[in-house]
Image: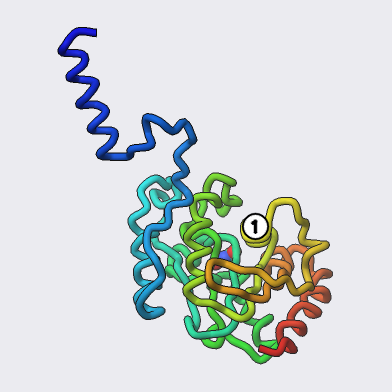
Amino acid sequence: MNKKNIINSIKLIKFYKFINYNLIYNNKAINRYKKDNYKISGTKAENLDKLKKSILSLNNCDLKKHAKNIVFSDGNPNSKIMLIGEAPGANEDEEGLPFVGRAGALLDKMLTAIDLDRKKVYISNIINYRPPDNRRPTDEEIKRYLPFITKHIEIISPKILVLLGSTAMNALIGNEVVISKMRGKWIEKRFGNCKTSVIITFHPAFLMRQPAQKKMTWIDLKMIRDKKI
Ligand code: URA
């Protein structure tokens, strides 16, 4: 190696050391999804604002290019009950609020049936931007948004977490489970510092296609109504 190459190698090593020491010596893949950009401190409102800003500043997501608005949440951040759906549709994208279309109208009826409404609960989705043509979010998209919804749960810290449909269930509970076996059970789960009782039920859009399943959902709703929190 001539002198020039040695000097260049030293400069390169210094540079790598400056940006990330492990890059040269560690052959493990860099996990871009596990980055925890901030710690939870400050008020709930401040943390929600920070979380929303970090989603808004995400720059490797194609969904954002097609969407009109971020759909972050609706309802009462101090509620003990948080509901999580899949992803916004056309109406939600237009208004920037979750569950305001036809599935949302059914969700409102489901909540009313157990003396709740969207001012008494807190609602969000696994994905914060509308997938084009209302397609299901891909695994890659779910992986990208998972740290945000996990942080969202931790900030709200609900006593009851209601997962609406299999996308929310698979994203937060695991891919190996099926909704027909998992719905209607309490599962104790921890998200960061938040310990919560999770219940899975059918997604309202699914219930519109399969109204016969509404009787199962009624069982789940009564479990939520009767849970001591
Ligand atoms: N379906 C969802 O999963 N979320 C919404 O916000 C609307 C429809």
Q: State the quadrant of the C terminus.
A: bottom right
Q: Residue 5: image x %, image y %? A: 21, 13
Task: Locate residue 192 relative to residue 8 in the image: left or right.
Answer: right
Q: Residue 142: image x %, image y %? A: 55, 52
* Residue for point 64% across, 79% down: 160
Q: State the quadrant of the N terminus.
A: top left
How is the rendered protein coloured? Answer: rainbow
The answer to which quarter of the image holds residue 10 is top left
Instruction: Tell me the kind of residue under disc 1.
Output: Thr
Q: Residue 95: image x %, image y %? A: 43, 69
CB at disc 1 and ligand 1 closer than 8 Å: yes
* Total tally of numbered discs in the picture: 1
Q: Residue 192: image x %, image y %? A: 53, 67
* Residue for point 75% across, 74% down: 186
Residue 109 vs 173, above or below: the answer is below
Q: Callout 1: helix, strand or loop?
A: helix
The answer to which quarter of the image holds residue 170 is bottom right
Could you say which is closer to the camera, residue 142 or residue 191?
A: 191
Could you say which is closer to the camera, residue 99 or residue 167?
A: 167
Answer few, some or many: residues within 10 Å of disc 1's Cα (few below 14, many 20 plus, some between 14 and 19). Answer: many
Could you say which is closer to the camera, residue 1 or residue 148?
A: 1
* Residue for point 59% across, 86% down: 117
In the displayed orientation, state which residue is furthest to the top.
2
Which residue is label 1 attached to? 167
* Residue for point 55% across, 87% down: 120
Residue 74 vs 139, above or below: the answer is below
Ligand 1: quadrant of the figure: bottom right
